[in-house]
Structures are given as C-alpha cells and as structure tokens.
Amino acid sequence: MQQRPAGDQGASRVQDVVGEALTARVTVTEDGTVTGWNEGARELLGHTSAQVVGGPAAVLLAEVPAAGDLPSLARLPRWHGRLALRHRDGHRVEVFVLAHHRMPAAGGSGAWLLLSPLTGQEPLPADDTLVAVSFRQSPSCAQALYDTGLRLRRANEAMELSVALTEREMLGLRVGEIVDSEAGELAERDMLRVLETGEPHYRENYLRASGENREHAWSVVQAPLRDGDGRLRGVCLTAHDITEQFWARKRLQLIAEVGKRIGSTLDVARTAQELADVAVPEFADFATVDLLPSLEEEGPAHAVDAPAGESGGSAGALSAAGPVTLRRVAHQSVLAGIPEAAVGLGALDDYPDGSPLVTSLRSGRAVLHQVNEPAIQQWLAERPLRAIRVREFGFHSVMAVPLAARGTTLGVAVFVRHRHPDPFQQDDLVLAEELASRAAVCVDNARRYTRERATAVTLQRSLLPQRLPEQSAVEVASRYLPAGARAGVGGDWFDVIPLSGARVALVVGDVVGHGLHASATMGRLRTAVRTLADIDLPPAELLTHLDDLVARPATETEGAEGTAGTGESAGDVGATCLYAVYDPVSRRCALARAGHPLPLVVSPDGSAELLDLPTGPPLGLGGLPFESLEIELREGSLLALYTDGLIESRDWDVDAGVSRLRGALARPTASLDALCDAVLAATLPRRPADDVALLVARTRALDADRVAAWDVAPDPAAVATARKKAVARLEGWGLTEAAFVTELIVSELVTNAIRHARPPIQLRLIHDRNLICEVSDASGTAPHMRRARTFDEGGRGLLLVAQLTRRWGTRPTAEGKTIWTEQNLDAPPDLF
C-alpha cells in the first residue's frame, strides 16, 4: 500500500475530528457560479452537489437583497451577515453566512468561500462546565475575580502559583491583603477606579513572586464585569508575566541611553565615567572602567593591537604572560561614596592571570562568573582587600568586558551585582558587550582627539613667546588659554616686539578655526608680523602687507585640481589682528586693527574705555584699506589687547563681556600677573568655547634728560659740531667709554645725510638700556651697506657702523626716514 504523505495524514486526522458535514461549505466564483458544494450544504438546503455545481448561485436565494443592503464586495477580504435561502422543498431558510474572499492567483480569477454552521448556534448546558474549567486551568495568565466590595471570589491555578496560596485560602481577602506590598495597594486603587468609571485599567508591576528569589514584571489588566442587565457585578484582574519582554525593553532602552549619554565630551576619563553612570543602577550595582596605562603615552604604537586574522569588531589580546597593570579611570555604585571600590580613581593595580579582567583582556571576549566559582575564590584569596569587599557587600555575580575599538584594546569594564537578586545571564553578557563596544569607540575617539589636541597645544605654545623680551617702554603680562576639549586648540596669539628708538610693538591676533592647521597658520602670521615689524612699517601699512600674505594662498590654490574635498586649505583660514606701536619718548601710541576687537585703555585714575579705532576688515579679504589711530597715553596707563574668546560666550552677549572686562581691568591689583588672573576669573565661563589670548601693558615714559636732540645744518662743517655735542652729552650721562664709537657713528651718519639726503636733518641720542643714535632727514631713499672695492674712495661707512654697533637699521617716517643704531653699553665692541 502506498504511504500517504505526512501533510495528507495530518489533514485526514483533522477531518476525522471536526466532522466535515457540520458546516455548510460552498465555493462561488466572482461571476456567481457555484464551483464547490459539500455534504453540510446538502443537509442545509437539500440539493446535491451534482444539482448545484456549475449553476448560478443566485437561484439559491429566497429573495434578492436590495442594492443598498450589500456593500461593494470587490475589495473586501471577508463578508459576514444573514441571508434568506430557499430549500429544495421550497421553504425559506435564514442562516448566518461567513464569506472569505480568495484572491485570484496569477492569471486566474478569484472566488468566495461561503460558510454556515449547522449546529451549535446556541450555547449548550455543558458549556458552562467548559468555561469554568478553562478559567481554572488557563496557563497563559493569572486571573482573579473580585466582587464590588473588592473581595476575591475566584482565582485560577496560575494565580494560586503566583502568590503561593490556594483559592480557598484567598476567598474573601482584598488584593492588598493577598499581596502585602506597594503593588497590592496600587492594584486595589486601580480596582476601585474601574468600579467608579466602568472602564478597564492597565498597569505594569515589578515584584517578586512568593517563594522565588527572582523578581518578575507583570502586565496587569483590570476590567469591569457586568451581568446580562448591564449591572456592574465585580472586577476581573488578569496578570501576564512579561519578565522577558520587560528586560528586553530595558536592554533596548539602555542601549539607547548609551547613544545619548556616552561620548558627550572628548575627554577619556569623562567618557569612561559616562559608561559607568549608564550601567548603574539599571544594569549593575557596581561598575568600574580600567584602561591600559600605555594609552597615556603618545602614539598608537603603545596600544594593544588585535590578533592577526580577527575582524575589526573583536578585541585585542595580550600576548605576554603575567600580571596586567591597569589604571582605574571611572567607577560608580548604587551606594553613596562607592564603598565597594578597592582601587581609587587614577590608581594603578596589577591583575594576575586567572582574574576576570585579565581573562577577558587575553581572550578578547566578555566573561561571566559567579563569585562562588573556584577560580574567583582562588583570585580573591590572593587579594584580601577585595575578598573583604565581596563578603561585606555580598557580591554574587560579575562580568568583565574588554573595551576594544578599531582593532585596539583599550581596557576593560567590570559589572557587578550584589543588591540586585538576579545573577547575570547570557543575555546580560550580550548587552554588556554591546555597551562596551559602543563606549569603546567613544573612548578611542577621545583618546585620539586628546593626543591630537596635545600635539596642537604643544605646537601652539611653542610658537608663542616663551618669555616676553625686556624693554623700557612698557611693563607687560600675558595669558593664553586653549579652548575646551570639544572645540580644540585654536590660532590665538600675541607678541611683544622691541623696535628701534626704545619703542615697542604690541600684537594680538586670532586665526579662524581650530586644530593643527590653525596653529600652523598662526605661526606663519606671527613670523610675518615680526619680519614686517623689523623694517619698522607703520601699523596700517604692516596690516596691508599681512592681508596680502593671508589672501595670497587662496589665490594660488584657486582652481587647482584635487582641492575639493581634501580638507581645509591655507586660503580657507581667515584671521584678525591688532597692531600697536608705543613710543616712550613722545608717549604716543599708534594702533590699527584688522577685524579685531577694540582695545581697552585704563587711565592712571582707574577709568577704563574702549579705543574707537577705525574699522578694518579681517585679514584675507584684500582690497580694503586699513587706517591707524595715534593717541597720547599718560605714563602709567594700561593698554589691554585680547581676542574675542575673552568677551564672547553662550551665556552673555559681547557688550556684557566687554563690561565684565572693563570692570576687572579697573580694579587695582598687586601686579600685572595678578591682574591677568583677575580678568580671566571675571570674564571666562567654566568651559570656554574658544581660545583666549590676553596681553596687558602698563606704559612708561623715558625721562627727558635721557633724550638729546639737535638740528643739523646741511653743511659739512656741521659734522664736527654734531660730534662735540654728542660727546658732551655722553659725558653728562657718564658714558665716556662709548664716546669714541659714538663719534665715529655720528660722523658717518650725519655726513651721509648732508651728502645724500635733504634737510631738515636732526641728530638724536637716547640713553635707554642701550645707547641709541638716530639721524633723521627728509629723504625717502634708504642707504644700503656694501663692501667697497680696493680703490673706492667711499662705501665703507655703513660697514664700519655695522661692526661697531649691536644693530642698526632704517625706518620710514612721515617726513622721510631715520637711520638708527644701538650700542650695547654692557660690553663695548672690541675695536682692534
């Protein structure tokens, strides 16, 4: 005999049980032709299959329904209702019909399956027993019935198991008496609300079932019970155990929290602390994060590489045997003060082979242990302090998860439970790996950024003045603060440049942007400013040349192939600058700015005001002029130059920042260094969003008896007179040792002015830290030092001056030029 397929056997068994003839089944095509007719249909209407199949279904109707009584059936998946049919013997049969619309297969036509039960339309007396049994034995949920007095009347077996009481033992008790906890009180309040409103109520509870150590999550639905007349007779309480769904939802929420809360800053320690904070108390009672100390060293070579052949998502392993040293960077606890910690923040500790942390690091996988396992007990026996903590707080379950990102192992996170009654399960291990994986990427980002930022800060500080030069014109102090971690170091800078004639240049600038590129650009600009200052350009002219320098790279790279999408180019970086030159002889200060904040001047009486400098565009725009402002400053005036990071903040507007700065500068302090600290304390927010550079200078005036000036007639005979006057003044200053060299310098410079320049001619001596000799004339032509040939009659004068002086140069003036020299009074030159 041929064996029937398993599917056919199953269908046959079902047919034997259900009784095919107890339901009238008829199949009708879309156009109304009967294609199927079973024995139940024959019993209902008396027609045989042969008499009906192939004919129209409409002949079976006792009356045709009105057009408005039937909806459009073409798009309905199902229809049900009552139909009046005609029996074969002619009498009318009204039946309930359930019709299923069978959609057509590809290329075919659809059909309707019409069903009508032949028996069981009314409940049987035996059904009451079936209902009672189903209530008692329903395994899907715990159920209990309460009357209007909130007293229990019935409870099924699942409810008896959940509270460890029989129905007879609970009869007549309130729910708050059966469950002596907050959950019982809440359930009773909800029950009262159901009786008052007649509406169902839903709540989730989390409590431990009687006789179990593990807590369960319950979905509790309370619904009103009404009799046939609609009167409220009681409340049905249904509780579903949704513990697994609850924990699955909690895990998803925890993963979502990781994305929101971890990586808010680019600080390694804070990122690690955020991981510990997320894990406690939702996931663990105590959590620690330990990182490899080698990560603190610069360069990725010190990190632990992942094993060859492993995917990027796997952690690295430690190949060397022996204990592993880790640094505690974060921990958190459900207990105040984190008393479980055996290692303090920032402390190093050695972990031996066999400890959960080292096992996890070496394998590159998360490990789960119960504290009573022999391996854990052996490790604790070698660590008495940890053993005391385990016993004192009742540790019972621990997980260690490696922190690895981009093929590099960074450290390990440990999660411990002692108050939570449930030990960690395998699902918890998967969740811990997910938490650690996401946190490790953030830690690695912070680590890489910290290294890059440290490089940028080092570059920035190396490009700034290491110490301010000594000069007599002003007393100066400065501060530089890099921006907060997220913004990164920028391109703020300052400088103090000694100039000829005892003058000094004060500079503050700001490069737009952050990072290494901004720092490198700052270095270029600072070098350019010092170069331009060395040739004594006026402030406005110096900024014009500096503007060309910034704008030129953009022009050179414009249209270059491959520049798009390759990052920031040199021309992409703009800058602002403020350049000031102060002369202690005349007490005049000339200033010009290129898009930079206005400087503040504090007079000796304490009033602080912004200098209304002409507006100049930021560097790099090109084609727009810069203008200077020249003012006279009283001796002891305070000039404050700064970048916009000092006055701009998310917490207040620029005007408020300037007001804070003005108030801080006007308050007396013991020194300029103390003044700088007071200014920063008064103006900066806790986390500055931008770099800050501050340069303060208190002006000095050179005594009039230290300056001597004479007009020189454009006559060669005036050279001897000029020499005598210079020597006489040196004797008055007690500088007779410098008289011989000064005579030679005066003779050469005055002779050149008389021969090659135009009057008026002036000779000036300045007794400062060095002896300064200046000869001014009305010619714009500057002399150039050259090496004279053997038979040349001239050309040796400037070469001789250069050999006898510390330095010399030419600076342009409004009327012409000035040739100046400086002699070092501490060490006169060796003439022979």
Image (cartoon, grey):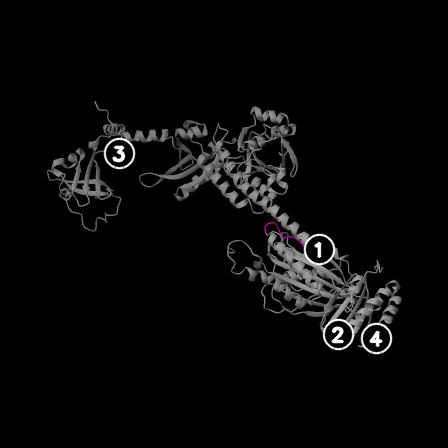
Q: Residues within 10 Å of mark 3 (few under 14, many from 20)?
A: few
Does residue 725 lie above or below 349 as drawn?
A: below
The residue carrying mark 1 is 465
Q: Residue 718, labelled with which disc?
A: 4
Q: Amino acid at mark 1?
A: Pro
Q: Secondary structure at mark 4?
A: helix
- Kindly give the residue lying farthest to the top in the view shown: 1
In the image, taking residue 517 as reference, residue 785 lies left or right, namely: right
The reply to whether dot 4 and dot 1 touch (C-beta < 8 Å) is no
In the image, taking residue 559 as reference, residue 830 lies left or right, namely: right
The residue carrying mark 2 is 757
Q: Residue 123, labelled with which disc?
A: 3
The reply to whether dot 3 and dot 4 touch (C-beta < 8 Å) is no
Image spot of residue 620 (x, y percent): 59, 63
Q: Quadrant of residue 407?
A: top right
Q: Residues within 10 Å of mark 2 (few under 14, many from 20)?
A: many
